[in-house]
Image (cartoon, rainbow, N blue to C red):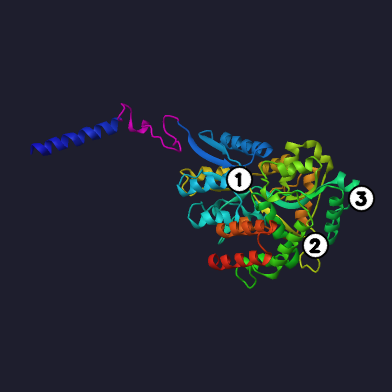
Amino acid sequence: MVKRLISLSLTLSLLFLAACGLNGGSSADKTTSDSKGEETASGKKQELEFWYIDTGEKEKVYLEAVERFKEKHPDVEVKTLQIPNDAYKQKFSVAMSGDEAPDVFHNWGGGWLKNFVEQDKVLDITADTDKEHFNELALDNSTFEDKVYGMPLSLSIDVIFYNKEIFEKYGLTPPKTYEEWLSVIDTLNENKVIPIALANQTKWPGAYYLMNFASRIAGPDLFESALNREGKGFDDEAYIQAGKYIQELVDKNAFNPGFNGVPYDEGQGRQLLYSGQAAMMDMTISFLNNVRQEAPEFEEKLDFFLFPTVPGGKGDQTHQGAGTGPVWSVAKNSEHPDLAVELIKELTSTETAQNYTDRTGTLTAVKDIEPADEFTKRFYEVVQQATHLQMPYDQTLPPELAELHKDTTQAIFGKEMTPEEAAKKMEEKAKEILK
């Protein structure tokens, strides 16, 4: 009986303390805190974490969008973290595997994002996405099994930039065919000018050549057929021929010495163009933004042409290499998913998109945003005339196959592997991974 009275007394005491609050206030005033900063009656703000890779004017556009979001949500704080491109993927993968991913994160859509979707790490935002707000092909790159997992801000294409001053000096015109391109390369070599700058240590810059040559040879259906296991494979003759074109360019001394050891992010390849040592570079249109940040005086010398056609090829210059990134997605374990979705809506709003394209020399995946900038408007016209946009293989394939694609392509450039060997390796791995 005594034990029961003691137990009852303790229970009543605990209930009384809970009602009054352990620190003397009411239970509603109890302060709780965690890594995400829950809103409490004490006034502590809710917190979102936002990771991105870009610097310069792009970063300014993102941060301005964050400020607009905060004005609409004064009870929310946004912690931002910029991570350089080459380090981002590894850091993010580690964060994802440990369930420590940021609420809102940069990605490129395609296979890279799909990998995390299949791990159930990314929030399905289909119900919150206005599909009419985006370029359909761009949105498709972050849509899997009819569910949307990311909102794209950027739509890029890759073109071949060139130095107009050098071309004029040697009487050259932008080539439209592969044979014309080889002639340009020969003339530049004769005059001690590096024809094409290539910074291929990170492998993806060289991968554009394999993708573009394959598209020009076999048309845009080749990759989809190989990816979806619908007849053609990654050992198709078109991929072998694409590798042979790459090695022919290497044999023609089309690239700077040591190109496979030159990192892209540090800008060494771009400096070859700025300094007049090299005449061309196959790169995404983000190159224009690089020029404006690093060497604005070079812009008056800058122009571009589309990847040339090849003899007997089924592809043409309306088939355009393209990419999305940033695509903004939300981690599924975000403690504030509704707020995170509101943030990515602001990061892809019409205002953000217009600022992005006008100030960074880059196209946007948001519909009906025509650039005011005259140079960027020319990129916009290329997209408007395109009949197919091919997203980069390394962003579309599953991660393991994507890495092999970059590895084998780099090996083709280094002549450490024949095109036939590279194609065989790709197809063998594709049979293992793709169903």
> Residue visible at 42% across and 33% down?
40
Q: Which numbered dot is residue 370?
A: none
Task: Judge depth for marks 2 and 3 and give the one in front.
Answer: 3
Q: CA distance from mark 2 to mark 3?
A: 21 Å
Instruction: Name the residue that disc number 1 marks.
Output: 86
Q: Secondary structure at mark 3?
A: loop
| Picture quarter with the N terminus | top left
Instruction: Name the residue that disc number 3 marks.
Output: 171
> Residue visible at 70% across and 40% down?
355
Mark 2 nearby-residue class (10 Å; few <14, some 14–19, many ≥20)? many
Image coordinates for residue 175, horizontal then vertical, percent: 85, 56
Q: Decide: is 212 above or below 256.
A: below
Looking at the picture, tell me which residue is in the foreground, 192 or 69: 192
Instruction: Name the residue that disc number 2 marks.
Output: 309
- Can I make out residue 214 in this image? no
Residue type, label 1: Asp
Looking at the picture, tell me which residue is in the foreground, 314 or 403: 403
Could you tell whether 281 is left or right of 47 in the image?
right
